[in-house]
Image (tube, helix red, strand yellow):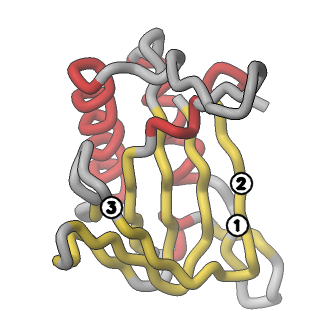
Amino acid sequence: MRVLLQRVREASVTVDGKVSGAIGPGLLLLVGVEASDGDADIEWLVRKVSQLRIFNDDAGVMNRSVLEQGGEVLAVSQFTLFASVKKGNRPSYSRAAKGEISRPRFEQFVAGLAETLGKPVATGVFGADMQVALTNDGPVTIWLDSQQAE
């Protein structure tokens, strides 16, 4: 699984002119699922996202997690995180899991994160054409890949 994490002051996702999810200060997560992803990938990402110390403490040092900060989370499924551009100019998305695999994995990730945070996680609409708006804070943008846990 891959997550592009952005610390935000606010973020929202709109589908067909209606806001399906919106948050204040917290994290916007763009989430991609690969066919081989399993429970261990989800558990690693839930733990990493919830405990990553990227919010400022009272001294202005990035030393607090979204869990400690009490921030909100907006998760948006995004298969394009598995784009391959090795050949030609048209990206291939063959590594991205098909909907029947990625949807339950994405939902499992969101549920695990909500349980860990003790609050709901806002989402977009799986498989829909979505417009995502955000005010990046910092900016702080971090790439997480459960297959290359660094």
* Disc 2/disc 1 C-alpha distance (Å): 10 Å
Residue at the disc numbered 3: 130
Query: Is 13 on the left or on the right of 150, as rendered?
Result: left
Task: Identify residue type, mark 3.
Answer: Met
* Disc 3/disc 2 C-alpha distance (Å): 21 Å
Task: Find residue 105 and report its image quarter.
Answer: top left
Mark 3, mark 2: which one is toward the viewer? 3
> Nearer the N terminus, badge 1 or badge 3?
1
* Disc 1/disc 3 C-alpha distance (Å): 27 Å
Mark 2, mark 1: which one is toward the viewer? 2
* Residue drawn where x is 38% and y is 54% of the image: 76
Task: Identify residue type, mark 2.
Answer: Ile
Find numbered disc 2 in the image and state the secondary structure of the residue it sits on: strand
> Nearer the N terminus, badge 3 or badge 2?
3
Q: Nearer the viewer, residue 148 or 133?
A: 133
* Residue drawn where x is 52% and y is 41% of the image: 47
Residue contact between numbered discs 2 and 1, judged by CB atoms under 8 Å = yes
- Residue 94, position in %: x, y? 50, 16
Residue at the disc numbered 2: 142
Find numbered disc 1 in the image and state the secondary structure of the residue it sits on: loop
> Nearer the N terminus, badge 2 or badge 1?
1
Mark 1, mark 3: which one is toward the viewer? 3
Residue at the disc numbered 1: 54
Task: Identify residue type, mark 1.
Answer: Ile
In the picture, the disc for residue 114 is none
Query: Is 69 on the left or on the right of 61, as rendered?
Result: left
- Residue 132, position in %: x, y? 42, 70
- Residue 91, position in %: x, y? 62, 31
Task: Find residue 135 and report its image quarter.
Answer: bottom right
Residue contact between numbered discs 1 and 3, judged by CB atoms under 8 Å = no
Q: Nearer the viewer, residue 46 or 80?
A: 80
Number of residues whose C-alpha sits closer than 10 Å to that of mark 3, classed few (under 14), some (14–19) or many (20 or more):
many
